Amino acid sequence: MKRIMIPAFFCAVILFLVTDIASGLEQGTILYHSSKNDSIYGRDAELTLPESVLQVAFREMKSGHVGLYIGSNRIIHAVMPAVEETESSNFILQKDLDEGCRYIGAKVPVNYDDPAAWSQERKEQLILLAKEQVGAKYDVQFRHQRGPYADGFTCVGLIEYLFEEVGYDITPSGYYKSGTGGITFTQIYNSESTFWLDWSGENTFSQTVEFSKFEHPLANILNVGLIHEGDRYMFFPYTQYLQTTTMDVDTDIIVSGGSDKDDGDDGGSCFIATAAYGSYLHPHVQVFRTLRDRYLLSSKPGRAFVAAYYRYSPPMAEFISRHDLLKTAVRVVVDAKRYKRNYGL
């Protein structure tokens, strides 16, 4: 039989197909992303809080966001109006990507791979506790921030609460007002909230303890912030991200591009298979998913392919989906491989 040479492009397609959507990322991994225009309070040179209610309404808070990965391409995070469990692709929705929100990274406790410190039972306790918070209200006034359930959570407050409840303190408790351990600056507000008159507030960003002091022309009127000794404080996600109690880990799940429609499947994540077959439910796609789960994810190189898939496959899939000839070619290659495997040719 004459041997058919398969172009390198289609070999790459097959590799990406078999790596699809599964994950070597551990349950309990913490995910972080920035806000609009890739800004996040505390990281960027310009530390500013929104001047008015209108800016907050248009999501100009710039505080970033945090979520907890619970396995099987699912996350739990505190969002308006309540803590939710959803697909990991909804961590950064497509509309947020379009506005410049960007993934920052993933972290776990520094001793997370030590079974003496983090037994499987302890990790499962963390996930169970997270699931129990689903439905808790979002603390829109930042009056409590770290819960518990009846008081409500902010995104970073939820993560801090969950880990503290299983005996791991990510960010030391405390209230930063000024001096060492953070950044202090004066912000001039001038908007409808100040009747377009200059109003100065001393705002801080804590690098070492949970809460940063802030002053805002609407803070007293709207009763915003956690009050401590007469001052108002907020826990910012980037403060938690900076802590040396956690370490970076590679991300091999889809964390962006979701539509906020959680129907319990992962159809939006299998980019190339969907492009070639029109549906991630196609039987041939299921075969590749099985190969992925049994073989690729059992090795470090295989998991590396998964990470590469999420980085490079969307534009490739989009290109394939626009060309019927390419879709047909991909299907031919896949079907030929499957036929050879089944019949020993």
Image: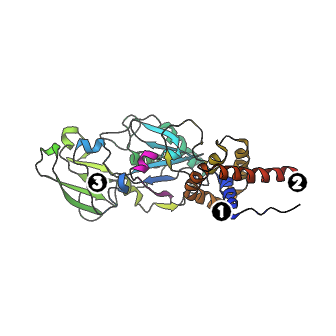
Q: Nearer the viewer, residue 169 or 56?
A: 56
Asked whether the viewer can see residue 225, the reply is no
Q: CA distance from mark 1 to mark 2?
A: 29 Å
Residue 134 sits inside the magenta stretch: no
- The percent coordinates of residue 310 (x first, y second) are 57, 55
Q: Which mark is residue 344?
A: 2
Residue 96 sits inside the magenta stretch: yes
Decide if residue 194 is on the left or right side of residue 243: left
Q: Earlier in the sequence, mark 1 or mark 3?
A: 3
Secondary element under disc 1, as helix, strand or loop, is helix
10 Å crowding of disc 1: few (<14), some (14-19), many (20+):
few
At x 23%, y 39%, the residue is 223
- The image's colouring method is rainbow
At x 43%, y 50%, the residue is 97
At x 38%, y 41%, the residue is 153
Quadrant containing the C terminus is bottom right
Q: Which residues are magenta?
A: 94-112
Q: CA distance from mark 1 to mark 3?
A: 40 Å
Asked which quadrant contains residue 303, the reply is: bottom right
Give the residue type that dot 3 points to.
Ser
- The percent coordinates of residue 121 (x first, y second) are 60, 47
Mark 1 vs mark 2: give the one in front.
2
Q: Earlier in the sequence, mark 2 or mark 3?
A: 3
Residue underneath mark 1? 300
Q: Which mark is residue 212?
A: 3
Residues tagged 1 and 2 counted as in contact (Cβ below 8 A): no
Decide if residue 204 is on the left or right side of residue 209: left
Mark 1 vs mark 3: give the one in front.
1
Q: CA distance from mark 2 to mark 3?
A: 66 Å
Quadrant containing the N terminus is bottom right
Q: Find the residue positioned furthest to the left.
A: 197
